[in-house]
Image: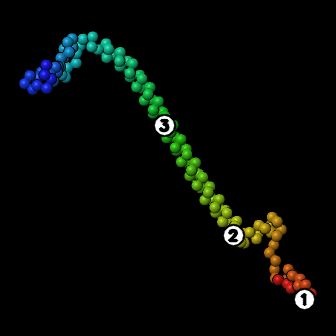
Amino acid sequence: MNAGNSSQPYITSVAQMGVGRRVPGLRFKVGKLPRDTAFWRPVGKTLLLLLPLALAVNLYVVSATNQINESIIGVDNRHHELMDQNIELRAMRAYVRAPEQLQRLAGEKLSLYAHKKGQVGKYNSRKGYFTYL
């Protein structure tokens, strides 16, 4: 037997399939549904199994997305509250760190006051007298 001989006829074993393949036992045309129960019983059982499952999955996904949206909204609200608090704290810090506020608070809380001219004296040991600042 010559495997590479091209003079031999070449036959393929491909099944001949038409566009409108007919299934034995199911007789319906395009656009018309079959009326026999042999077709609809498995379809009904499949739908009774899959539709509640699909509905449950849909409800779970919707509730999960709603919870995620609510948590995002809550985090966003908290973020804005913290930004407002940060602005208030920065304004308070700027107010407290002002030089006149520092002197006033030091005087009230710690009894520390800035000296006035002539109140503080520095002793000069070489000359033997005080120099007032």
**Residue nearest the observer in this picture, 111 or 132:** 132
Q: Residues within 10 Å of mark 2 (few under 14, many from 20)?
A: few
Q: Position of residue 109 (x, y in %)?
A: 80, 64
| Vertical side of 115 occupied by 21: above or below | above
Q: What is the C-alpha distance between the residues marked 2 and 3? A: 48 Å
Give whichever of 14, 19 is nearer the camera: 14
The amino acid type, in three-letter code, at marker 2 is Ala
Count of numbered badges drawn on the protein: 3
Distance Cα–Cα, label 3 vs label 1: 86 Å
User: What is the number of the mark on residue 66?
Assistant: 3
**Residue 127 numbered tag:** 1
Q: Earlier in the sequence, mark 3 or mark 1?
A: 3
Circle number at residue 57: none
Q: Which label's residue is closer to the chain start, 2 or 3?
A: 3
> Which quadrant of the view contains residue 101?
bottom right
What amino acid is labelled 1 in the image? Lys
Q: Residue furthest front?
A: 1
Circle 2 residue: 98
Tag in front: 3 or 1: 1
Q: Residue at x 72, y 72 (%)?
A: 100
- Describe the element under mark 3 as helix, strand or loop: helix
Look at label 3 and name its amino acid. Answer: Asn
Q: Given this view, does label 1 or label 2 mark the residue nearer the observer?
A: 1
Looking at the rendered structure, the secondary structure element under dot 1 is: loop
- Residue at 60% x, 52% y is 82
